[in-house]
Amino acid sequence: MAVLMSPIHFCLEMSTFYRETSSRLYRVSAYFISKNLAELPSYIISAVLFTSILYWMSGLVPLIDSFLIYILVGILVQNIAISIGYLFSCIFGTVNLAVAVMPIFVVPMMAFGGFFINQDTLQWYFVPLKYLSYFGYGYEAVAIGQWTHVEEIPGCSPSIAHCSRNGTEVLQNLSFKASNFWIDLLFMSVMILGFRFLAFLALYIRVKRRT
């Protein structure tokens, strides 16, 4: 939802933005930075509210550190989605075109994030999509926050095939590593900055072409 709503607000302001920048009321950088800062609190608060409700309704591990990890990942993933929305809205400039093209990028990121396909089973030509998938980084970080606290899974015996006896084995079966936790958070943070920087460049180029 966030990735679909962000270009709507951005694109609706384009005509006003063009008029005011052409009148030299402010620079492109001032508009872009102020818009990011003004909208950031609302996206953080909405992510905190959503994850706080979903976490306890889902029956996940009732530990405060796992809960805080879940909230943090939710904030990062939502802001990556917003950043992608900014990028596509700055590139295409219209709501209809931005919303139509975004799924071409977002759906493969979801497909190769580890939810539906184990990332270690991907063919070599799909591996780059694995590293671009912000869903994958978020999924791994949340899984680490949950399963590292599970020391034993009842009802699992050696006679049962593919049965994980503890949280560590669950992570191994998912092709995740506990040591990747901070790397996942770093990559998600870099993706937020990277997509927003590309969005700024696209907006700046769009303005320069009109002048």
Image (cartoon, rainbow, N blue to C red):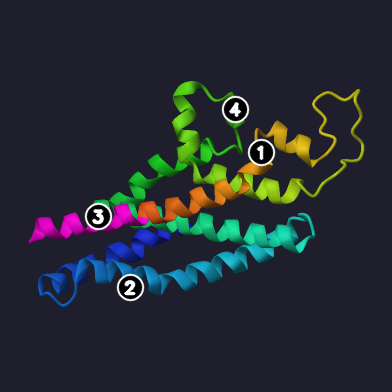
Q: Amino acid at mark 4?
A: Asp
The residue under label 1 is 177
Q: Amino acid at mark 2?
A: Ser
Q: Is 163 placed above or below 196 here? A: above
The residue under label 2 is 34
Q: Where residue 138 appears, x then y in whole percent? A: 58, 48
The residue under label 3 is 201
Q: Where residue 74 appears, x then y in whole percent? A: 58, 58
Q: Is 137 placed above or below 200 here? A: above
Q: Residue at x 65, y 42 (%)?
A: 179
Residue farthest toward the bottom in the current orientation of the protein? 25
Q: Residue at x 76, y 46 (%)?
A: 148
State left or right for residue 94 relative to residue 111: left
User: What distance separates the C-alpha of mark 4 from that of mark 3?
Assistant: 35 Å
Q: Residue at x 71, y 33 (%)?
A: 172
Q: Where residue 108 appears, x then y in whole percent? A: 46, 37
Q: Which residues are magenta?
A: 196-211
Q: Earlier in the sequence, mark 2 or mark 1?
A: 2
Task: State the residue in front, 93 or 100.
Answer: 93
State left or right for residue 157 relative to residue 162: right
Q: Residue at x 50, y 46 (%)?
A: 134
